[in-house]
Amino acid sequence: MNKIAFTNDLTVLLRGSRTLLVVATARTWKKRRFPCVLSEKLRGLAIDLARDVGPGDNGNVQSTLTGGTAPRRLAAGVLPDQVSRHNSPARAEAVRAIMSRLGADTRGKTAVLLVLEDAAHLTPAANAVGRALPLFSLRASTKPTTVQIAAVDTGGRAVRWTRAVKETVAANREAARLVDTPPTDLDPAALAREAKALLRGITGVRVREFVGPALLANKLGGIHAVGRCAVSKPRLLQATFSPRGAKKHVALVGKGITYDTGGLNIKTGSRMSGMKGDMGGAAAVLGAFRVLASSGCKHKLSLVLCIAENAIGPAAYKPDDVVVFHSGKTVEINNTDAEGRLLLADGVSWAARKLKADVVIDAATLTGAQGISTGYLHAAVVSNEEELETLLLESGRASGDLCHPLPFAPEFYRREFRSEIADLKNSVANRKNAQSSCAAIFVYEHIADAGVRWGHVDLASPARPRERGTGFGVALLAEAVRRL
């Protein structure tokens, strides 16, 4: 396990460190600009190292032995001076890439010194370091490591750690751990237990859970249908945080499919592998809720985790079934592998109608088409309000969890779900017609008449772009709620 610690004292940072990584932009690495916060020897060696490293498009790193002086190993991480307007000015992905290439020293403490051009870059930069150091491992040879981080500005002044920053890094890593956990170890009941454990002890948080038949009793037919044949029962887990004087009520809704076989429309070939990560949206909203509730939030918050395993068995829901949802709408099933939207439809309706939220933001690993639409580093955003859409995009650049908008045009996409016998079908007629936008519109149809501000974040690719979970969405959603 990689343990992360924080300090504002550079003496403490260097004490006992076997490796020191210093990260700064190329222009900061100039001899006259680099802050005098290290010993003359270390500073000179680091600047010489950086001189030979081109930042490339996405950062670079080079290391050397220091010749017996502590720390034994010194590394210079060089960030590009300029980034495009759809990147984060904190260069979070470049920080992550540098930390990933270097890795944690398995024989001793690794110290990371972030030299920031703007103090506002602290959260995304620190989160990027944490993202490169995943918590989950079942390797027999795994050795515990310690990584300690400090940050200074270009003038050498300490950039202070706040509880919100520390909580964001911790919650992001926990979200990634959940995504990495094998599905038999993280079935619906286990995910609910994990959620309760992560929220336990936070003042003012109350948790309720609706399991199995209780879903039908509360008109949550979509969640129940998807998960009813799995060994572990489907459920809705609800948490609330109500600070005094709150004027807005924000609900975070997450898709928590702990494993997705595709149902009776079973996934074929290699398409099922990796579906343990189909609860990445639930992990993201859980992490964001924990950050906000534990570090202080001016709004009333609700968390709605829609949890199920899309399994196969005699009781599985079937193509041609018609399901009644919390919204009152009926849906004809034409693809059991388009199940996430069924959970979200119930979840957003519950948040809007039952919990009376003013703003509803859902997050989900909803469509494979998201990666085609916006790539592996930008989540897709769809919203019924331009102001909320813009807020999410700006929060993405500020937090390092990047996103990009997709069209919100119900009048163009509603026809894709036309059914002869029900209000909607659950999957599109034409898979080439803006699949990710269409999936979002299906969810929106269940709250279109509820009068709420709604934002949707499809993070299918950013949540698990390679073989590991990233915790994507925790920082984005926490930042967005703060800005509301």
Image (cartoon, rainbow, N blue to C red):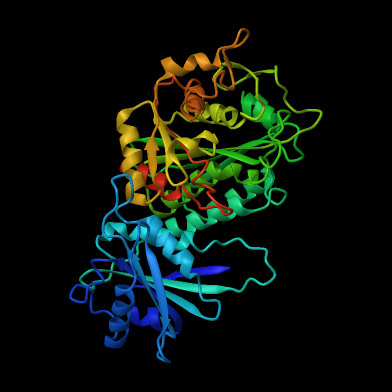
Residue most toward the bottom?
Answer: 68
Quarter holding residue 218: top right
Residue at horizontal 50%, vertical 13%? Answer: 415
| Viewer-proximal residue among 152 and 167 | 152
- Image location (x, y in percent) of residue 472: 47, 49
Relative vertical location of residue 377 with respect to residue 41 in this rendering, above or below: above
Residue at horizontal 50%, vertical 69%? Answer: 103
Q: Is residue 355 left or right of residue 189?
A: left
| Viewer-proximal residue among 416 and 15 | 416
Image quadrant holding the C terminus, namely top left
Residue at horizontal 49%, vertical 20%? Answer: 445
Quarter holding residue 71: bottom left
Residue at horizontal 54%, vertical 47%? Answer: 283
- Regarding residue 165, the answer to whether it shows in the image is no
Residue most toward the left?
Answer: 32
Relative vertical location of residue 194 with respect to residue 98 in this rendering, above or below: above
- Image location (x, y in percent) of residue 142: 63, 71
Relative vertical location of residue 284 with respect to residue 154 in this rendering, above or below: above
How many discs appear? 0
Quarter holding residue 74: bottom left
| Viewer-proximal residue among 325 and 21 | 21
- Regarding residue 232, the answer to whether it shows in the image is yes
Image quadrant holding the N terminus, namely bottom right
Residue most toward the right?
Answer: 314
- Image location (x, y in percent) of residue 85: 28, 45
| Viewer-proximal residue among 168 and 141 | 141
- Image location (x, y in percent) of residue 159: 28, 67
